[in-house]
Image (cartoon, rainbow, N blue to C red):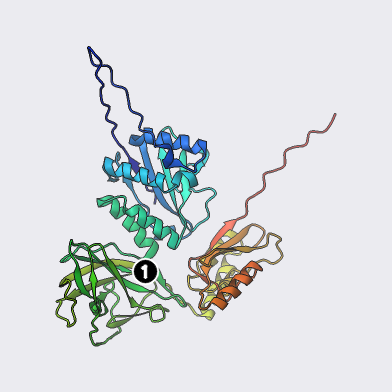
Amino acid sequence: MTCRIGLAVAVLVAASLAYAAPAPPAPAAPAAPAAKVAGATAEVSAIAAEYWKNLGKLFFQLEFVGMEEEKYTSAILTTTEVTRTRIDQAQAKRLLDYLAADGFFARAKVVPHQDDHDGEFPGLEGPCYALTIRAEGCPTMREAMGWGPPLVARLEALRKVVEGAAGGEIDAVLTDVTGQAAWSQPASGLRARLKTYGFISKRLGLWVQVEIENVSDKPLAVDLGMLEMATFTLPEDQKPETERTRPRTVSWTVLRPGDTALRIIGKSDLCRDGRLDLGLAVWNLKPGPSALWATISDDGSQPGKPEVAAAWSGKIALTAAPFWVYSGKTADEIAAATAKIRKERASNPEAMWKALAELVEPGMTVKEMKAILPPDVTQTYGGGSDWTDNLCDRLFYPLDDTFYVLAVGFAPIETDKMSAEIRRDAQAGEALDDAMILTLRPEIRRYPVAPPAPPVTPEP
């Protein structure tokens, strides 16, 4: 989905008075101060200055790059197109000022005109979100905003700059990236939201958390024990297999205005392999997209309330947090499906590899992926991985002389010793096939074709 953000700010010009008659007004140049683009090259600084001079023709585009793009929303904001979510001039200026101060212009790349097409991102490796800024008559700039926790942190910071419908656009992106639902409507000065962080698979379970925030102007005493008694619901076709009761626990805390509290309600080891063990019920889930709703309530009557604040009481309906359920097929089922695809699509390697990649699900190990997409060890292209500080790994290897696999995953760390061993193996070039767990389906890519050699003109 292509998304555009347009920003327009009117420039007011003040007339100065001469001795006998008013002089013609001198236009004020709304260029960005040099400090806002510190660290950028002279070329980029000049482009940034042009953006400030053309705010009425400027728009932003925030879009997912990578496989399974249908899962990820893009933000749509503008001040000029009536078919989009519109923002006012104050928000427009805040957005551009924030991005400049955050270093966007120092990090972003200028996109050549021939590469500036909607939905195309030459030079960017997914999964990531790309932020593009365009203005009529100005060069386009684009930055890869990353993936995982760094992306979430940047999106949350961007969310604080906008409000209203524009904030809802960023909330939608955050929901898709983290499974984090939008904030509920406040009740008695408290609001809440669900966080589900992704998907249920064979090995990677679903963490379910509830975050609450005091949005009133006075301290509130909140019993977090109510969160364990929350009522959860799923789509209508998903009914609990088991329901139970448990004793109510009491856990008072005082939230000052603006304070938040986060409580884990469902743990990964209980919510995996198609099973959701949460609160007072257990569900066996169907493969595919799903979502989770919750209702929390309290009457503030539990004993032990701190005297320094009034007890919160009320009822909050939390908005839906989406997640994905992967089927966790057996080894025999996968082997049969793999053989069928290879037989039926052997004449079309690209179609065959892409169909096989659809059998690979998040939560599988690299070893299981290679049973479906075996590396071609006869190729000289080799393979490797990019190991990062948060142990998120990009792995690639050849399938044949035309196509290769790009996969993204991580290795769970339990001890410092394990961490050191994994880092040592990674530096040695080991594939970590048994340790690395995939967090996205792999992507099938084509090796770039070398341009033909120029013709050799024979010497006379």
User: Residue 358, how many percent across, how many down?
Assistant: 50, 66
- The amino acid at mark 1 is Phe
The foreground one among 97 and 20 is 20
Which residue is label 1 attached to?
323
Foreground pick, 54 / 325 = 54
Residue lying furthest top in this view?
A: 20
Q: Is residue 82 above or below residue 386?
A: above
Helix or strand or loop: what does disc 1 sit on? Answer: strand
Quadrant (top left/top right/bottom left/bottom right) for the C terminus: top right
- Residue 320: x and y in percent read 28, 67
The residue drawn where x is 37% and y is 61% is 176
Residue at 32 percent across and 57 percent down: it is 171
Count the marks. Answer: 1
Q: Quadrant of residue 248?
A: bottom left
Q: Position of residue 319 (x, y in %)?
A: 26, 66
In this orientation, does residue 339 appear? no
Q: What residue do we see at 54% from left, 76% from top?
A: 416
86 displayed left or right of 206: left
Would you say residue 253 is visible in this rendering? Answer: yes
Q: Which of the 4 image quadrants contains residue 10? A: top left
Residue occupying image coordinates x 24% and y 51%: 164
Categorize mark 1 by other alpha carbons within 10 Å: few (<14), some (14-19), many (20+).
Answer: many
Residue 359 x %, y %: 51, 70
Q: Is residue 447 left or right of residue 207?
A: right
- Name, please, the residue furthest toward the right: 460
